[in-house]
Amino acid sequence: MIRPVRERLQVFLFPVEGDKWLAILRVGLGLQVLLYALALKWDWNYLLAGKGKGQISRDLAEALLSLESPAVPRLGWFVSLGAHSGVGEETILPLTWILLFFAGSCLVVGFYSRLAAVLGWLLHLSAAKSGGLASYGVDNFMTIGLFYLMTSPLPDRYALDWRFRKTTPEDSRARGFFRRVLQLHLCLIYFFSGLTKALGRGWWDGSNIWRALIRPSFNVLPAEMLIKWKILFPIAGVSIWLLEIGYPFFVWHRKLGRIWLTCICAMHLMIGLTMGMYLFALIMIVLNLAAFGPKLAFISHRTPE
């Protein structure tokens, strides 16, 4: 009885997997890193400079971070390294931005994919932690996605460096394992996010959606429109937590999975359009398409993905 269960578990965790999902993850995260860098281009030094030079001193965020763990990457490491070499902070900070932008560009085209993924993960995590007082959920999901990418068997066949290092048959099961873990990770995230929403009153009566849409810096839609359509807020609130709670149960289904995945991506797209959270919407859509994308009708599943 134990052996069949163990064999089924092994087949579930280590399926033979193609690399199309990995290409989706690589290109999507490359675009995400590029847009992230471009969005912060003019404010990079202002947000991440040290004491007396920026909006909020980077030293404060890094001091708080040190209380949590001294091993978490931060921009202060690069600034200190530059200081030992006689290079000032005013040079190091723009250089880290250039390297982050370069890493994103390399990921999009697949040039030195693993090195670009590691560099992108390290620089983005350092910037997110050093600017922790100004970061939000998009940084956490970017870190998660880049971690899965840099530890997965790269390159994929659509990358430029495929001709220099082709993967082996053993890599197909490694790809299957990393994709399966990403799938399970998303299922846990959505389920507990939906459960938390369902336990609160604000998602039943739509008040949480109202507060989110009128909050300064996220109030993209005019107040007149929100008042006109406020009757739909309770329906939207309940629909959102139902989608999230049902995600781990229905996204695996061959037919219902396509519908569920499309609805989840549409939900994130609407969040991006109505609240101006474009980077958050993009990273969530990329992670979902990489994890379950081949279930969509327009992606063939005749061959392993």
Image (cartoon, rainbow, N blue to C red):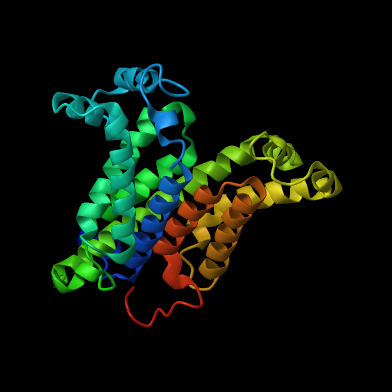
Task: Give how far across and how far down residue 109 sits, in percent.
Answer: 31, 65
Q: Quadrant of the C terminus?
A: bottom left
Observer-nearest of 242 and 81 = 81
Image side of residue 293 versus residue 244, left or right? left
Q: Quadrant of the N terminus?
A: bottom left
Observer-nearest of 30 and 292 = 30
Instruction: Give residue 201's quadrant in the image.
Output: top right
Task: Give how far across and how far down residue 121 sits, in percent.
Answer: 29, 45
Task: Give how far across and how far down residue 249 sits, in percent.
Answer: 50, 58
Give the residue at x 33% y 67%.
23
Is residue 242 visible in the rendered image? The answer is no
Instruction: Give residue 303's quadrant in the image.
Output: bottom left
Q: Is residue 167 above or below residue 59?
A: below
Give the residue at x 35% y 35%.
127
Task: Give how far across and how far down residue 203 sits, in percent.
Answer: 68, 40
Residue placed furthest toward the bottom? 302
